[in-house]
């Protein structure tokens, strides 16, 4: 077991998560008080890892749904399916979480179709109910049920944003890329790379993030820094790993790529 391991209620190790601030305490308080939580922040900064860590810590089952623009309320709630000539009702992930008292995590919730937010409203006030129109059921959430959603304010456009009437039903926490010392610890923990090269990758990530808004739409994520470190720890040459994990994913523009490659040379010395 590593130095950062946290033990779950059942004694198993929770996935490694290095807190940035007081997010663990806030999440625990939300869980105790049946309050829904919204996590805001750029992609790859640790939101999903945080939720799986918290679910394990609290000993609750986790249903994660990656939302996309075709995701509808029935994908979450459930539908009638034909099975061996019979029509049977099959619960969706949200319904299962409501019945079982689990955590339901809606990743990138703004991507989902508009009818999804309608379903969330009665679940996020003190009624905590999920009406299932198709079956006529009105489910009361089992103790332990918790709704968690995430979104990336950076991608926001006028069509894809959460309405105040929805967002004001959630406690909200802002996430960002961890400060260098913490990001280094994460990179070492996740990839097994040595401290010197981890520090160098984190320094490079900082420089690349400074280009956000000028040349790049989004800064390099902690996820990509971990990828680069994993490749390097596995024996790949530094420049190849950095190109594959920290440059190519950021842009398709040849000029910008050249500029980033120059930056890499400058940082690596
Ligand atoms: P998001 O959900 O914000 O897009 P993830 O939670 O999937 O991002 O994070 C991407 C990766 O970054 C994780 O798999 C993990 O390796 C690493 N990571 C980022 N932040 C942390 C953290 N605070 N503790 C541990 N790992 C982290």
Image (spheres, helix red, strand yellow):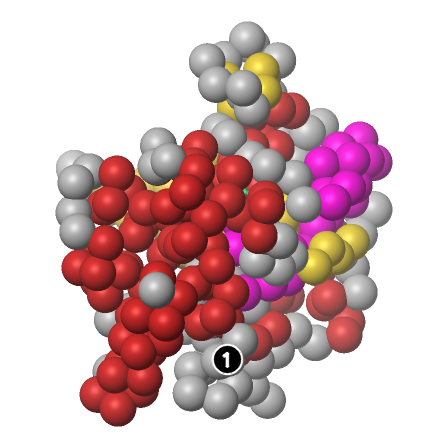
Asked whether residue 33 is drawn in magenta, I would say: yes
Kindly identify the residue that appears in the image at 32 percent across and 84 percent down: 259
Is residue 223 visible in the rendered image? The answer is: no
Horizontal side, residue 110 vs residue 195: left or right: right
Q: Position of residue 119 (x, y in %)?
A: 61, 59
123 or 191: nearer the eye? 191
Q: Count neighbours of disc 1 (C-alpha within 10 A) and say few if under 14, some if 14 to 19, many if 20 or more.
A: few
Write down the region rendered in magenta. Answer: 21-46
Kindly identify the residue that appears in the image at 52 percent across and 38 percent down: 185
Q: Position of residue 36 (x, y in %)?
A: 72, 48
Kindly identify the residue that appears in the image at 78 percent across and 54 percent down: 171
Please tell me whether mark 1 sits on a helix, a strand or a loop: loop
Q: Position of residue 83 (x, y in %)?
A: 21, 40
In the picture of the structure, the residue carrying the numbered disc 1 is: 212
Horizontal side, residue 92 vs residue 250: left or right: right
Q: Quadrant of residue 38?
A: bottom right
* Name of the residue lying farthest toward the top: 11
Residue 166 lies, with reference to residue 104, above or below; the image says below
222 or 37: nearer the eye? 222
82 or 203: nearer the eye? 203
Is residue 173 visible in the rendered image? The answer is: yes
Q: Position of residue 220 (x, y in %)?
A: 43, 66
* Name of the residue lying farthest toward the front: 269
47 or 30: nearer the eye? 47
């Amino acid at each position: 077991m590593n130095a950062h391991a946290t033990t779950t209620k059942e004694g198993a190790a929770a996935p490694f998560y290095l807190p940035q601030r007081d997010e663990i305490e806030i999440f625990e308080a939300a869980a105790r008080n049946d309050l829904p939580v919204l996590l805001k922040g750029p992609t790859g900064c640790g939101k999903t890892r945080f939720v799986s860590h918290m679910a394990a810590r609290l000993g609750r089952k986790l249903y994660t749904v990656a939302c996309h623009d075709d995701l509808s309320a029935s994908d979450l709630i459930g539908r009638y399916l034909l099975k061996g000539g019979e029509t049977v009702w099959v619960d969706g992930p949200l319904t299962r979480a409501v019945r079982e008292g689990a955590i339901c995590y809606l990743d990138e919730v703004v991507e989902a179709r508009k009818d999804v937010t309608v379903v969330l409203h009665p679940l996020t006030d003190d009624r905590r109910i999920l009406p299932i129109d198709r079956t006529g059921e009105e489910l009361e959430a089992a103790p332990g049920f918790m709704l968690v959603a995430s979104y990336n304010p950076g991608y926001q456009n006028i069509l894809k944003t959460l309405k105040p009437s929805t967002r004001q039903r959630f406690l909200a926490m802002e996430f960002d890329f961890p400060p260098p010392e913490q990001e280094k610890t994460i990179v070492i923990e996740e990839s097994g790379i040595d401290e010197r090269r981890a520090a160098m990758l984190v320094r490079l990530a900082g420089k690349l993030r400074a280009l956000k808004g000028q040349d790049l739409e989004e800064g390099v994520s902690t996820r990509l820094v971990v990828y680069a470190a994993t490749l390097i720890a596995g024996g790949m040459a530094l420049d190849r790993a950095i190109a594959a994990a920290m440059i190519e994913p950021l842009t398709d523009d040849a000029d910008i790529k050249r500029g980033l490659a120059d930056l890499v040379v400058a940082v690596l010395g």
